[in-house]
Image (tube, rainbow, N blue to C red):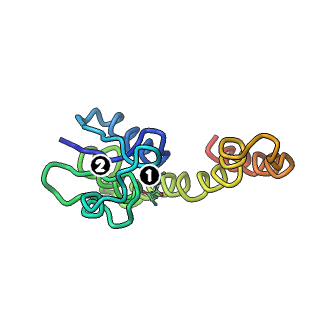
Amino acid sequence: MLQVWGRETSSNVQAVMWCIGELGLDYQRYDFGHHFGGLDSDAFYQLNPNRTIPVLQDDDHAPLWESGAILRYLASRYAPETFWPEEIFARCEVDRWAEWAKVSVVSLFTQPIFWQLVRTPADERDLPAITRAIDRFESKLAIAD
Ligand SMILES: N[C@@H](CCC(=O)N[C@@H](CS)C(=O)NCC(=O)O)C(=O)O
């Protein structure tokens, strides 16, 4: 069975859990990271020397880290026809949107929209910067539409 280390409020953990859900796989998830702690232990270092979540272990295989690599592992092992096709151009079509979402879209959302609106007190927020960032973010999302 799949084991996942990582709190469910982490966007990178959410990407992995979303994929596991789409594939209908059994899993056990453990709350690690942020206020749950656990990343500083020697045991966690053995799972991921970066001390970040998510980490995935499938049966007795070596633990995997980096959410993008975990997604590609799950897709190629459990849904090679649909999520990670053999045919190179079909695979590239999947891969480029996955890469685009992680690198181009998430980065525009995280800085500064998420940090400003979620992690910054209201009276310290830079509203013009947030507005500009939302415009850039929406133009990027329009590409997906
Ligand atoms: N590039 C890594 C980033 C991993 C990462 O930075 N994870 C964050 C959560 S999204 C983390 O471990 N934060 C420390 C914590 O939650 O305590 C990946 O995609 O897996």
Q: Residues within 10 Å of mark 2 (few under 14, many from 20)?
A: many
For the N terminus, the image quarter is top left
What whole-number distance in Å separates the C-alpha atoms at marks 1 and 2? 13 Å
Q: Nearer the viewer, residue 73 or 12?
A: 12
Nearer-N-terminus badge (1/2): 2
Q: Is residue 46 left or right of residue 61?
A: right
| Residue 74 numbered tag | 2
Q: Is residue 41 left or right of residue 128?
A: left
For the C terminus, the image quarter is top right
| Residue 94 numbered tag | 1
Task: Give the farthest residue toward the right.
Answer: 128
Name the residue rendered at 23%, 34% in the picture: 26
| Residue 42 numbered tag | none
Q: Residues within 10 Å of mark 1 (few under 14, many from 20)?
A: some
Q: Nearer the viewer, residue 126 or 97?
A: 126
Name the residue rendered at 49%, 45% in the picture: 11
- Amino acid on which disc 2 is placed: Leu
| Some atom of ligand 1 lies within 8 Å of the CB belonging to the residue at label 2 | no
Q: Nearer the viewer, residue 95 or 63?
A: 63
- Amino acid on which disc 1 is placed: Val
Name the residue rendered at 28%, 52% in the picture: 76
